């Protein structure tokens, strides 16, 4: 199989698995009392982070996209990928995420999907006291997702893509994702990845009872984009040595 097509296929499959496990685990917590005692945060963090670690350990042997459009943006900014290839990687990732959302949609009954919002990351504690979406909430969510994505992207750049990287596969990136979710689960969901939001978010339209499913979309596109750019600047100016430029 042509290397380019293998790259796109692996990015699609890898993103599918990360989104499926992340969203699916969140939905599963609504099937038992786990969600009532705070266990959902740990369950989602470990399931999604460890899946990401495993997936990156084999996808990055062929593709550097890391199942995250924000990482691809960083690769393009650092001239590691041309625009056409970067767009191809992003489309493959979003396609995998969309299929993962479809899988979650038909794995659970509508009541569970409504309660869990189909496993979609969304703003929670940063909303107004009455639960309404305000400019302050959007701004806070944007800043948090930018921070989370910057942390994940820096982990990718320094432990997977750097010439002197430690030989640990995707473990450090996966653990970073665990930390991000543990901190951000009750704030933004700790997505740090536009694809993680995109896949299940689109399928919310097919479930009754979920109001304004795309109202918070800017947080999960703009935040990660800015976070990836910030991580790229930090890496390029203060971390990367001459051999990686």
Image (tube, rainbow, N blue to C red):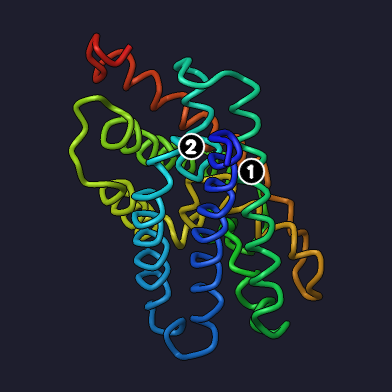
Q: For this rendering, which residue is in front, 243 or 228? A: 243
Residues under numbered marks 2 and 1 in contact, where contact means CB atoms less than 8 Å apart = yes
Q: In the shown orientation, is residue 210 left or right of residue 236?
A: right
Q: Is residue 52 left or right of residue 2?
A: left
Q: Depth check: give the residue in front, 82 or 120.
A: 82
Secondary structure under tag 1 reads helix
- The residue that disc 2 covers is 65
Q: How many marks?
A: 2
Q: Quadrant of the C terminus?
A: top left
Q: Is residue 111 above or below residue 58?
A: below
Label 2 – label 1 distance at C-alpha: 10 Å
For label 1, count other residues whose C-alpha is less than 10 Å away and answer few (under 14), some (14-19) or many (20+): many
Q: Which mark is residue 92?
A: 1
Residue 133: x, y in percent? 67, 53
Quarter location, residue 78: top left
Could you tell whether 52 is left or right of 141 in the image? left
- Residue appearing at x 40%, y 41% in the figure: 60
């Amino acid at each position: 199989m042509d290397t380019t097509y293998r790259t796109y296929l692996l990015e699609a499959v890898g993103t599918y698995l990360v989104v499926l496990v992340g969203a699916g685990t969140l939905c599963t917590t609504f099937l038992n009392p786990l969600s009532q005692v705070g266990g959902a945060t740990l369950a989602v963090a470990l399931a999604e982070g460890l899946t990401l670690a495993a997936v990156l350990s084999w996808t990055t042997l062929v593709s550097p996209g890391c199942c995250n459009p924000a990482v691809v943006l960083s690769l393009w900014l650092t001239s590691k990928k041309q625009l056409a290839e970067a767009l191809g990687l992003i489309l493959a990732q979003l396609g995998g995420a969309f299929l993962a959302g479809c899988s979650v949609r038909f794995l659970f009954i509508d009541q569970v999907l409504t309660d869990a919002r189909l496993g979609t990351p969304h703003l929670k504690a940063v909303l107004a006291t009455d639960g309404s979406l305000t400019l302050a909430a959007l701004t806070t969510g944007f800043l948090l997702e930018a921070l989370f994505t910057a942390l994940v992207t820096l982990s990718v750049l320094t432990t997977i893509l750097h010439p002197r990287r430690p030989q640990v596969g995707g473990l450090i990136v996966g653990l970073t994702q665990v930390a991000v979710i543990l901190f951000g689960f009750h704030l933004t969901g700790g997505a740090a990845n536009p694809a993680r939001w995109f896949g299940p978010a689109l399928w919310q339209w097919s479930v009754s009872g979920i109001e304004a499913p795309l109202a918070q979309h800017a947080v999960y596109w703009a935040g990660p984009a800015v976070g990836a750019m910030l991580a790229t600047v930090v890496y390029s100016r203060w971390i990367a040595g001459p051999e990686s430029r």
